[in-house]
Image (spheres, grey):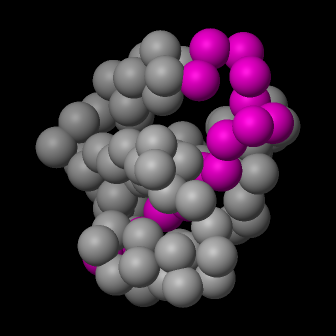
Amino acid sequence: MSTESEIKTAIQGVVGSNYSSWYIGITANPKQRREQHEADGKDTKYWREWKADSETAARNIEAYFLEKGMKGGEGGGDKPTYVYIY
């Protein structure tokens, strides 16, 4: 598990300032969610995921990067604690 700050720093290190090229989401089951994205025809080759220390942290991280221009939307289902990007 990682803190909100640790995950934000990690994501920033991966995407730099190229926010609009990346998708961010949250989920309780990253394996299943990745399979859903792939079934929808999305390229998840550069998939990365982190387990946040709380649902609140995961939601805050998602909102932070959506505001910066990442693709995605609020949601995440029931009790999402994983943050993922691709």
Q: Magenta span has 28? A: yes
Q: For the view shown, which residue lies furthest in the left direction?
A: 1
Query: Measuring 47% from the left and 15% from the top, which residue is drawn there?
Result: 13
Q: How many marks?
A: 0
Q: Residue at x 33, y 61 (%)?
A: 81
Residue 2 is situated, as x and y percent measured from the top left of the image, at 23, 36
In the drawing, does residue 31 fall left or right of residue 41? left
Identify the image quadrant of residue 74.
bottom right
- The answer to if 42 sits in the magenta stretch is no
- Residue 4 sits above or below residue 45 on the image: above
Stretch of the chain drawn in magenta: 15-29
Q: Position of residue 21 (x, y in %)?
A: 75, 37
Query: In the displayed structure, does residue 63 sit left or right of residue 46?
Result: right
Picture quarter with the N terminus: top left
Q: Is residue 43 left or right of residue 22?
A: left
Q: Between residue 38 and residue 73, name the one nearer to us.
A: 38
Q: Is residue 8 visible?
A: no
Q: Is residue 25 above or below residue 8?
A: below
Residue 48, position in %: x, y?
A: 38, 44
Q: Against 16, is 55 above or below? A: below
Residue 17 can be seen in this image: yes
Camera-nearest residue between 80 and 24: 24
Residue at image coords 58%, 59%: 43
Camera-nearest residue between 21 and 41? 41
Q: Residue at x 67, y 41 (%)?
A: 22
